[in-house]
């Protein structure tokens, strides 16, 4: 009979996902709007170690933010 010490990668992954869900639940209970959720995703993406993932996620959030801004008929140089 072989004894295994410690946790398997699958167990660690399940625990990590459960912890992330708990954090999300606390944030949602705090009461935030959709724009704040996008800002939080943007800020969390900046913390990623993988530079490619960070850039892809932040660029996506930037496109959402641009789409949400009302278009003005006056030329402002922005």
Image (cartoon, grey):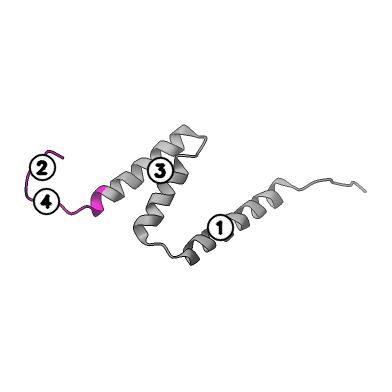
Q: What SS does tag 2 mark?
A: loop
Residue 6: which numbered mark, if any? none
Q: Are marks 3 and 1 in contact (CB under 8 Å)?
A: no
Residue 63 painted magenta: no
Give residue 22's position: percent from left, percent from top: 58, 60
Disc number lying in front (3 or 1) = 1
Which residue shows up at 40% across the image and 56% down it? 37
- Label of residue 57 in the image: 3
Residue, disc 2: 76
**Dot 1: what SS?**
helix
Q: How many marks?
A: 4
Within 10 angstroms of label 3, few (less than 14), some, or many (20 or more) residues? Answer: some
Instruction: Reply yes or no: does residue 71 show up in magenta.
Output: yes
Prevailing SS of the magenta stretch: loop
Between the residue at mark 2 and the residue at mark 3, the CA separation in whole angstroms equals 28 Å
Cα distance, mark 3 to mark 1? 20 Å
- Most extreme residue toward the left, as rendered? 74
Query: Badge 4 is on which residue?
Result: 72
Within 10 angstroms of label 4, few (less than 14), some, or many (20 or more) residues? Answer: few
Residue highlighted by disc 1: 23
Q: In what quadrant of the picture does the C terminus appear?
A: top left
């Amino acid at each position: 009979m072989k004894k295994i010490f410690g946790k398997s990668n699958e167990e660690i992954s399940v625990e990590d996902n459960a912890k992330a869900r708990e954090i999300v639940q606390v944030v949602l209970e705090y009461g935030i709007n959709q724009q704040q959720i996008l800002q939080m995703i943007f800020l969390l993406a900046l913390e990623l170690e993988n530079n490619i993932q960070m850039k892809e996620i932040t660029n996506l959030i930037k496109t959402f933010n641009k789409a949400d801004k009302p278009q003005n008929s006056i030329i402002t140089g922005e």
